Image: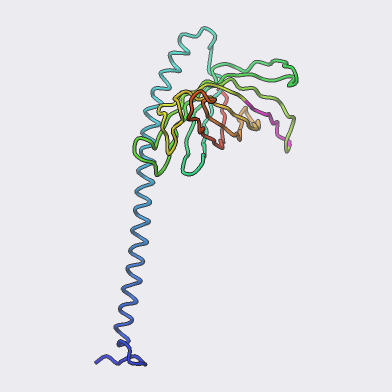
Amino acid sequence: MALPTPGGGEPQFQWSAKLATSRLIQIYAALDNAIHRCVFQFTYLKRGINGLRYTLNNYLWVIFTFTLFSSTAKALNQISVDVLKGEGEIAGARLGLSPWASANYRLPLLGRVAVTTELSLTQLQAAGADSGFDNNAVYAVTPVLRKSLGRLFSIPTELEFGIGASLLENRHFGQKDLGSKFQFEDRLGLLMQLNSGLAVSLRYMHYSNGGITASNPGLDFINVSLIYPL
């Protein structure tokens, strides 16, 4: 026979059973929420990989055709692999190719600069957005200028900036109507030359259509790039 608790309340073993049941329910709810979050993230990762594979195939065909018919493209100069982080849950991966070696010019105010052209493919994901608005691909051609800043922490460092043209796969992305598939691609960053021609770059990147449509919210990213010579 169960003994009553002091004050005439419920028996002690009934109170302990209720507490244990409540704790088990809380633990189950936490585990269920964690499992759902893992499945949710895995689903978006899988869709992002599939989307990148599809757009990469298209991109490589464009590069192959462009290189085949361009008499000035003798060999690929460098390749870059980037990760991007945008506002909220927007993130992405980027592949860049420079078909030509950089050329040196002397420009007013800037002095001596190196100029090259980058062809790039960016695959973007907006976690949590509605289906059909959660991924996007960006194809871009961007002239890039690099100005030597000397050495930073004994590492050769360059200022990198450029303005190019890009084409989105989808005009609507995440919670935004970007106004048009055409977007300008702007970049500003620092590039540090490492050993054997390897380089790393930290950039701010911005996409917008320059106000050619009424809707022009733009996209902003912080970009970290690893650049390999070819």
Q: Is residue 221 above or below residue 72?
A: below
Q: Is residue 6 above or below residue 142?
A: below
Q: Is residue 172 found inside the magenta-colored segment of the image? A: no
Q: Is residue 10 above or below residue 58?
A: below
Q: Position of residue 174 (x, y in %)?
A: 42, 38
In what quadrant of the picture does the C terminus appear?
top right
Q: What is the number of callouts on the image?
A: 0
Q: For residue 16, which quarter of the picture?
A: bottom left
- Residue 82 in view in this figure: yes
- Residue 194 in view in this figure: no
Residue 72 relative to residue 112: left or right? left
Q: For residue 229, which quarter of the picture?
A: top right
Depth order, front residue of 64/41: 41
Q: Is residue 160 found inside the magenta-colored segment of the image? A: yes
Depth order, front residue of 49/171: 171
Outermost residue to the top: 71
Q: Position of residue 106 (x, y in %)?
A: 73, 15
Q: What residue is at 69 percent from the left and 31 percent from the top? A: 157
Q: Position of residue 42 (x, y in %)?
A: 37, 45
Depth order, front residue of 93/230: 93
Q: For residue 224, which quarter of the picture?
A: top right
Q: What residue is at 43 percent from the left and 13 percent from the top? A: 65
Outermost residue to the front: 214
Q: Position of residue 80 (x, y in %)?
A: 54, 28
In what quadrant of the picture does the N terminus appear?
bottom left
* Magenta part of the chain: 154-161
Chief secondary structure of the magenta portion: strand
Residue 183 relative to residue 8: left or right? right
